[in-house]
């Protein structure tokens, strides 16, 4: 299980760096997209990098909502 989580975290780190570079390209005016796509990828990749805590927070929130996982 740790290998799978580590693999997801490595992929998330790649997307994190990629989104920072995309934000820089948007800022320089050399990208055709706006700020929304790189920011969404940045947030999602940060959650994937912190996957163990993200999963525990989702489970706690579901438990508070009355959903049994």
Image (spheres, helix red, strand yellow):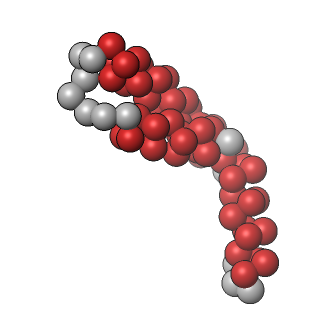
Indicate the position of residue 23 as horizontal and vertical percent values. Answer: 41, 24
Q: Residue at x 68, y 42 (%)?
A: 50
Q: Residue at x 45, y 43 (%)?
A: 40
Asked whether, in this view, residue 53 is left or right of residue 6, the answer is right
Instruction: Decide if residue 7 is in sight here.
Output: no
Asked whether, in this view, residue 21 is left or right of residue 3, the answer is left
Asked whether, in this view, residue 40 is left or right of residue 1, the answer is left
Asked whether, in this view, residue 33 is left or right of residue 59, the answer is left
Image height of 31 relative to 55, above or below: above
Indicate the position of residue 13 as horizontal and vertical percent values. Answer: 55, 29
Indicate the position of residue 19 as horizontal and vertical percent values. Answer: 43, 29
Q: Looking at the image, which is closer to me, 44 or 31?
A: 31
Q: Give the residue furthest to the left.
A: 32
Which image quadrant is residue 4 in? top right
Q: Residue at x 77, y 77 (%)?
A: 63
Instruction: Decide if residue 25 is in sight here.
Output: yes
Image height of 35 relative to 26, above or below: below
Q: Looking at the image, which is closer to me, 15 or 20?
A: 20
In which quadrant of the rendered image does the C terminus lie? bottom right
Indicate the position of residue 12 as horizontal and vertical percent values. Answer: 53, 36
Q: Residue at x 52, y 45 (%)?
A: 44
Image height of 64 relative to 41, above or below: below
Q: Looking at the image, which is closer to me, 10 or 22?
A: 22
Image height of 61 relative to 34, above or below: below
Count how many numbered circles sit on residues in the image.
0
């Amino acid at each position: 299980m740790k290998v799978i989580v580590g693999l997801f975290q490595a992929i998330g780190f790649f997307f994190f760096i990629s989104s920072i570079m995309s934000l820089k390209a948007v800022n320089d005016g050399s990208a055709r997209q706006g700020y929304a796509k790189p920011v969404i990828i940045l947030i999602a990749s940060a959650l994937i990098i912190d996957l163990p805590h993200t999963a525990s927070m989702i489970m706690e929130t579901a438990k508070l909502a009355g959903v049994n996982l």
